[in-house]
Amino acid sequence: MLAKHRKLSLIVGLSSAALLTGELAARLVLGLGTPPLSIEHPSIEYMFKPNQDVSRFGNRILINEYGMRSESFPPQRRDSSEIRIMVFGDSVINGGSLTDHSDLATTLIAKELAQTKNTKAIVGNISAGSWGPGNWLAYAKEYGFFDADAVVLVLSSHDYADNPTFKSLNPNTHPTRAPVLALSEAFNRYLIPYSGNLLTGMTREVFNGSTSEIWSVDAAAIQQVLVNLEEFLLLAQEEGRKVVMILHPTREEMQNQKMQEGHYKLSDLAAQLNIPTLRLKDAYQQPLANGTDIYRDDIHINDMGQRILADVLLEVTPWPTNW
């Protein structure tokens, strides 16, 4: 009986030690247990919870007081020479947990503009996974444009039918609270979904709070998106702000050299409003032809893709003439 008791105690002790080691490794090595948190919002639908600074997979995820993936800055400029650019988008510009703050296109251009123009440059990364025109419009109405000189909108073809649904947030894709255990997050958010994919042969992308979805494409949904987008663009143009639309292609669009329907509907609307439109397929073509992969999956770009996006922003965005 004593031997059995000792054996049981040894098993319990070893199991506890293994769990503790796994928990520490998940937290300290992977950064699990402290995901970037989202909050529900009555008009925006959802956004990142303001004032976060966490580490995930070795990457810094910084969220400022306005829910942007950007450094903190005052809402109004304090110096007339200061450069201010607000970039709106979804998980493409947000970068997700696999992109460090320093490697974001918005961070890169803020640093380079400050150096080349010898003045302070603020670039807001206003984004969240699966956001669309309705979310951007609501955010702009809630927070404004922060004295921006220029507003940049980065869209993909699927955004032409992406309307807010105001459904309850999925804790595995848009967590609103930190899990009790890092190991539980590892199993629930990553291991179980990806294991299911392997078993069923189905593809499911989980990318820092965004899950790829098949949008419900119908005439009413498309019309509502275009109405929201037009209102957003007109609002952005007020007070003399420069506005530019950038269209980001998916890997499939690049491989097929054929843009989806949404690409043309979005660009047509911009043309009607005399807003310059840049198609990133031209910038992506050369590195892909040279064998450099700029994608993490079908939609999201890696660090090289962020660098290319930053270069394009620096070269072609219509910055104010007094810079």
Image (spheres, rainbow, N blue to C red):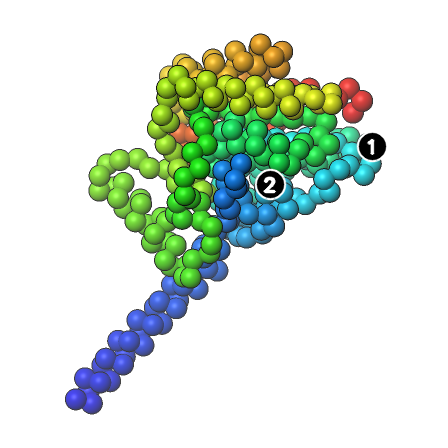
Q: Which mark is residue 68?
A: 2
Between 304 and 121, the residue placed more toward the observer is: 121
The kind of residue tagged 2 is: Met
Q: Quadrant of the N terminus?
A: bottom left
Mark 2 secondary-structure assignment: loop
Residue neighbourhood size for the residue with mark 2, other residues' Cα within 10 Å, grouped as few (<14), some (14–19), many (≥20)? many
Mark 1 secondary-structure assignment: loop
Above or below, 74 against 311 in this view is below
Residue neighbourhood size for the residue with mark 1, other residues' Cα within 10 Å, grouped as few (<14), some (14–19), many (≥20)? few
Q: Is residue 258 left or right of residue 267?
A: left
Q: Position of residue 79 (x, y in %)?
A: 82, 36
Q: Is residue 317 visible?
A: no
Q: Position of residue 244 (x, y in %)?
A: 62, 20
Residue at 63% x, 46% y is 64
Residue at 77% x, 36% y is 77
Count of residue discs: 2
Q: CA distance from mark 2 to mark 1?
A: 23 Å
Above or below, 72 against 113 in this view is below
Q: Which residue is mark 1?
A: 80
Q: Is residue 298 visible?
A: yes
Q: Position of residue 294 (x, y in %)?
A: 47, 30
Between 274 and 248, the residue placed more toward the observer is: 274
Residue 213, quarter of the rendered image: top left
Above or below, 179 against 82 in this view is below
Q: Is residue 89 left or right of residue 64?
A: left
Q: Position of residue 24 (x, y in %)?
A: 44, 64
